[in-house]
Amino acid sequence: MASSQPISLSHRVQRVKPSPTLAITALAAALRSEGKDIIGLGAGEPDFDTPEPIKQAAIQAIESGFTKYTAVDGIPSLKQAVVDKFKRDNGVSYALDQVMVSCGGKQAFYNLCQALLNEGDEVLIPAPYWVSYPDIVMLADATPVTISAGIEQQFKITPEQLEAAITPRTRLFVHNTPSNPTSVMYTQDELVALGEVLRRFPDVVIASDDIYEHILLGDIPFSNLLMANPDLYERTILLNGVSKGYSMTGWRIGYAGGPAPVIQAMKKVQSQSTSNPTSIAQVAAEAALNGDQHCVEVMNRAFRERNQFVTERLNTIDGVHVLASQGAFYSFANVEKVIERLPGITNDTELASMLLNQAEVAVVPGIAFGMENYIRLSFATSMDNLQVAMERISKALL
């Protein structure tokens, strides 16, 4: 029997890498199943249970038979909850045809890129960045262009950097605050300054990823580019979801608001991919957005305590430098001097591998986020786990 030729895959999919954070989490789970005592600090997932009122809303939806298809872009009552949330929290007014619900925040950004981008278009992405931005851009046949900002400038790009990166091919600028992976936040004045640049380039669309909006650890109030620059309303898309703020990662509900033609194009993309988000999860998300927000503050209190502990412990390790996190639940530590002094370690990927195998702690190398010589640690786990993990890391990096 003649041997078959391997199936040829698309150039598009071959450009894309699997998610490094999910890969690290899967590897940690595999090692744990082999009996190793792995502490996972790789996943961006709150360790809290979904609040009880949200779960009860979903249970009631199941029991009442709300288990059929819904409108592609979400049930009307959830879309209204999204409209109300944007008005309440962000001071932004949308009509129902200007918002849509998706299967997680990742799909909202994917829909946007598919609806907006063409081959040859450029997308500006500040680095360090969330791992999926560049690959989702490439899946839309466009080109990601990174603007790097290291720890020396608090991981925040300057207006001068932004203006220098814009070309006639720039179609989209992606902005995320509080940031994954750095947990820094842009101030209102910094956002105004970026807006002054964007105002001079009216063909550039703005995507504001606000998924960590409610996880605030310091004194900086949340703002995004649209809140700081309301006149950019007609070309800004706000991306958000319930995963982080309400500990609903597995429910897979994201949402977006923006100009009606863009939102309707995103809806068209979704209609030919996943169709509607899960009906039951939509009811739960509606309960989250409309319900008592006390659960968010309960989580934030724990994240603030963990942030202080992890920051202090990491900065006691020779060669490690980390900023206190301002939002989200990550520590993005500079380990360049550690790499220089450890024999056999030449980059952050090798360092992360060493920590996994020797210290049995899973972290993500900075290169996954577009910046070498860093590691990202998630403190969305218990203090008990963090205390053991910091002790192990300290010993491994002696």
Image: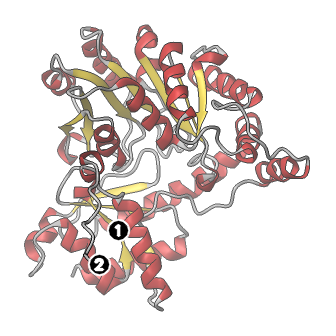
* Amino acid type for the residue under numbered disc 1: Val
Marks 2 and 1, the one that precedes in the sequence: 2
Query: CB of mark 2 within 8 Å of CB of mark 1?
Result: yes
* Amino acid type for the residue under numbered disc 2: Leu
Residue furthest to the bottom in view is 35
Q: Where is residue 264 drawn, in percent x and y?
A: 54, 20
- The image quadrant that residue 134 belongs to is top left
Q: Where is residue 123 drawn, in percent x and y?
A: 26, 30
Q: Where is residue 240 drawn, in percent x and y?
A: 53, 35
- Secondary structure at badge 1 equals loop
Q: Which mark is residue 287?
A: none
* Identity of the residue drawn at 69% across and 56% down: 50
Residue under label 1: 363
Q: Where is residue 333 drawn, in percent x and y?
A: 28, 59
For the C terminus, the quadrant is: bottom left
Residue 211 in sight: no
* Identity of the residue drawn at 73% across and 43% down: 279
- Secondary structure at badge 2 equals helix
* Identity of the residue drawn at 23% across and 79% down: 397
Residue under label 2: 355
Residue count near mark 2 (Cα–Cα under 10 Å), binned few <14, some 14–19, many ≥20: some
Residue 157, compared with residue 364, is above or below; it is above
- The image quadrant that residue 342 belongs to is bottom left
Observer-nearest residue: 57 or 316?
57
Measure how far apart labels 2 and 1 are at the Cα level.
Answer: 8 Å
In this picture, residue 248 sits left or right of residue 211: right
Observer-nearest residue: 172 or 55?
172
